[in-house]
Image (cartoon, rainbow, N blue to C red):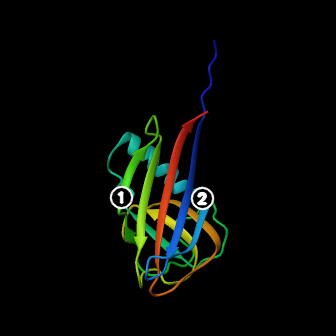
């Protein structure tokens, strides 16, 4: 018997924008692109633990479409933030759920892109997505829940 198994790597994120009183202003679910450096990072972690784990998210205002060769956001808004949590999920632990919160005054502006990185600056990008504008005011909070899944098909 000849058996073939393919692996598919995918990502999606959920954005929840709230005002200073905690009222939801906007909520979106968006697909993303796992970039080439992210794929290389995953395989490097399978052979050695020398590459740092993914630890930060960033928001940006760039509008160029996400591309496999991307290594940074088009135009980062403010500092990256550390994940508030990173957990494995699924019946076979096939998903990783990263959560980050961009509080009041952090990543403020016309947000059109987001990315996951393994450092607070520079480092390796795992994935990037570009979307229609989310206007994050100075008093708003944006929570990003990003799920990356590796599944056999």
- Where on the picture, by quarter, is residue 78? bottom left
Disc 1 on helix, strand or loop? strand
Is 89 placed left or right of 52 in the picture? right
- In the rendered structure, find residue 32 and report the number of the disc placed on it: 2
> Could you tell which of marks 1 and 2 lies nearer the N-terminus?
2
Mark 1 against mark 2, which lies toward the viewer?
1
Q: Residue furthest top?
A: 1
Is 99 placed left or right of 2 in the picture? left
Badge 2 density bin: few <14, some 14–19, many ≥20, Cα 10 Å: many
Disc 2 on helix, strand or loop? loop
**Count of numbered circles on the image:** 2
Q: Residue furthest bottom?
A: 138
Q: CA distance from mark 1 to mark 2?
A: 19 Å
Q: Where's residue 106, x and y in %?
A: 42, 81
From the viewer's perspective, is residue 6 above or below residue 13? above
- The residue at the point 46 percent across, 35 percent down is 91
Q: Where's residue 46, x and y in %?
A: 40, 41
Residue toward you, 7 or 48:
7
Q: Where's residue 36, x and y in %?
A: 56, 54
Q: Where's residue 13, x and y in %?
A: 54, 60
Residue 35 appears in the rendering = no
Mark 1 and mark 2 in contact? Answer it, CB < 8 Å.
no
Residue 153 appears in the rendering = yes
- The residue at the point 37 percent across, 63 percent down is 83
- In the rendered structure, find residue 85 and report the number of the disc placed on it: 1
Badge 1 density bin: few <14, some 14–19, many ≥20, Cα 10 Å: few
């Amino acid at each position: 018997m000849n058996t073939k198994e393919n692996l598919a790597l995918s990502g999606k994120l959920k954005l929840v924008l709230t005002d200073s009183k905690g009222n939801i202003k906007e909520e979106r679910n968006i697909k993303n692109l796992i970039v080439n450096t992210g794929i290389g990072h995953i395989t490097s972690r399978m052979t050695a633990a020398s590459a740092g784990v993914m630890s930060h998210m960033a928001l940006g205002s760039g509008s160029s479409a996400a591309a496999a060769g991307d290594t940074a956001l088009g135009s980062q808004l403010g500092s990256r933030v550390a994940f508030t949590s990173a957990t494995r999920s699924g019946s076979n632990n096939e998903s990783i759920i990263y959560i980050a919160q961009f509080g009041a005054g952090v990543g403020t502006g016309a947000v059109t892109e987001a990315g996951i990185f393994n450092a607070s600056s520079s480092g390796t990008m795992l994935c990037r997505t570009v979307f229609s504008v989310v206007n994050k005011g100075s008093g708003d909070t944006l929570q990003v829940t990003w799920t990356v899944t590796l599944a056999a098909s």
